[in-house]
């Protein structure tokens, strides 16, 4: 693969446009997906080819949940108001760059 050096600007929303020579070299078309891998102080961008992103926190949570289900520990029904709220918001479209209403504590 040829050496290509391109610079992209990060927007206020944390977005970049993948430069055309990079898209062409990787064969990424409109709607294509890219993967970002952090390796030390470098970010490596590659074509994703429909790979699923695996969040390590989700994997750990699912493992914990699986062990609890198998052992029958800490299992119970969702509170009715929480279940109803989840159902009410099931079809609510949201975007990750949408502002959050109200106070948020982290």
Image (tube, rainbow, N blue to C red):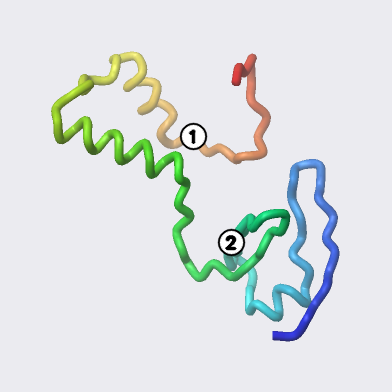
User: Could you say which is closer to the camera, residue 63 or residue 25?
Assistant: 63
The CA distance from mark 1 to mark 2 is 27 Å
The image position of residue 60, as x and y in percent, is 38, 40
User: Could you say which is closer to the camera, residue 21 or residue 88?
Assistant: 21
- Whether 66 is drawn above or below 79: the answer is below
The image position of residue 50, as x and y in percent, is 47, 66
Marker disc for residue 12: none
Q: Which residue is mark 1?
A: 92
Q: What element does badge 2 sit on? A: strand
The image position of residue 5, as x and y in percent, is 83, 73
The image position of residue 56, as x and y in percent, is 45, 45
Residue sitting at x 51%, y 70%: 49
- Whether 68 is drawn above or below 24: the answer is above
Mark 2 closeness class: few <14, some 14–19, many ≥20 residues within 10 Å: some
Q: Quadrant of residue 6?
A: bottom right
Q: Which residue is mark 2?
A: 35
Q: Is residue 103 left or right of residue 64?
A: right
- Whether 55 is drawn above or below 45: the answer is above
Q: What element does badge 1 sit on? A: loop
- Whether 68 is drawn above or below 103: the answer is below
Which one is earlier in the sequence, the residue at label 1 or at label 2? 2
Residue sitting at x 59%, y 65%: 31
Mark 1 closeness class: few <14, some 14–19, many ≥20 residues within 10 Å: few
């Amino acid at each position: 693969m040829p050496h290509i050096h391109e610079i992209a600007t990060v927007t206020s929303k944390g977005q970049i446009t993948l430069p055309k020579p990079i898209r062409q070299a990787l064969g990424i078309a409109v709607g294509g997906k890219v993967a970002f891998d952090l390796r030390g102080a470098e970010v490596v961008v590659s074509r994703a080819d429909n790979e699923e992103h695996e969040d390590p926190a989700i994997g750990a949570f699912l493992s914990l949940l699986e062990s609890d289900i198998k052992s029958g520990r800490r299992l119970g029904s969702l509170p009715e108001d929480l279940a109803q709220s989840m159902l009410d918001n099931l079809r609510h479209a949201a975007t990750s760059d949408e502002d959050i209403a109200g106070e948020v504590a982290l």
